[in-house]
Image (cartoon, helix red, strand yellow):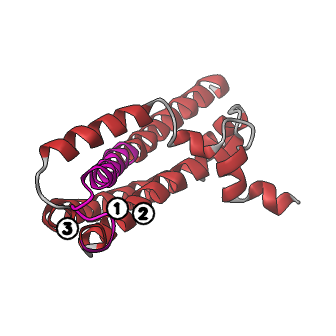
Amino acid sequence: MVEKNLGYWHWFSEGSGGKPGFRRLLNSWAAVHIAIGFLVALLVKLNLTACADTVLLPLAGILVALSFAWVGNAHALMQTPEIEELAKHHRGGFIEYAYVFQTAILAILGALIAWGLAGLSVFDDRWPTTSHPLTYLLVKTSLFALCSLTIRECWHVVLGSQLMLIVRRHVKAEGNDASG
């Protein structure tokens, strides 16, 4: 029973005292991502294969590398006594800190897989194809919305890591002031 409650998918669907993990992706920002996806889908006249090959797959590689580097930094910070102390006062506990970063990586990898399928011409050659313009626009919108979400998640990985660094320093300074 304990193992299930500590598992990622349990946290993702139900949370660990705070909100469920999926709410980090499906929140009020989802409308912004969909709007961005729709606007870009209307503006970009290239088919999805060309979009994936030209810009998005190389960009995704950069975003994955950037996020993995910062997640490594965050994991090192999470092992400090200051962040462990901070986690005691967080509704979701320490689990929340660890799994938030994993959720960002999940979102990035999901977008990379979806754009990989586009790069392999699945949407242009199999389904929905450009002969079904409304469905194709929906898929194109979804893919660009995923791109927007991925950029936001990458930013949150960097921002979260930096914030943990700042908070750690602040907690450490308060500890030194209290003992000195």
Q: CA distance from mark 1 to mark 2?
A: 8 Å
Helix, strand or loop at mark 1: helix
| Residue at point 45%, 36% (across, down) | 163
Is 128 within the magenta? yes
- The residue lying at 35 percent from left, 38 percent from top is 33
The reply to whether callout 1 and callout 2 are in contact (CB within 8 Å) is yes
Of residues 114 and 123, which is closer to you in this image? 123
**Location of residue 84 by image quarter:** top right
Question: Foreground residue, 50 or 72?
Answer: 50
Sequence-wise first label, 1 or 2: 1
Q: Residue at x 62, y 25 (%)?
A: 180
User: Quarter-wise, where is residue 37 in the image?
Assistant: top left
Find residue 80 and report its horizontal and vertical position in percent.
59, 49
Pointer 1 residue: 64
Residue beneath disc 2: 109
Q: Is residue 49 above or below residue 155?
A: below
Q: Earlier in the sequence, mark 2 or mark 3?
A: 3
**Residue drawn at point x = 60 percent, y = 52 percent:** 99
In this rendering, the label closer to the viewer, 3 or 1: 3
Which region of the structure is painted magenta? 125-153
Whether residue 60 is situated above or below residue 126 in the rendered picture: above
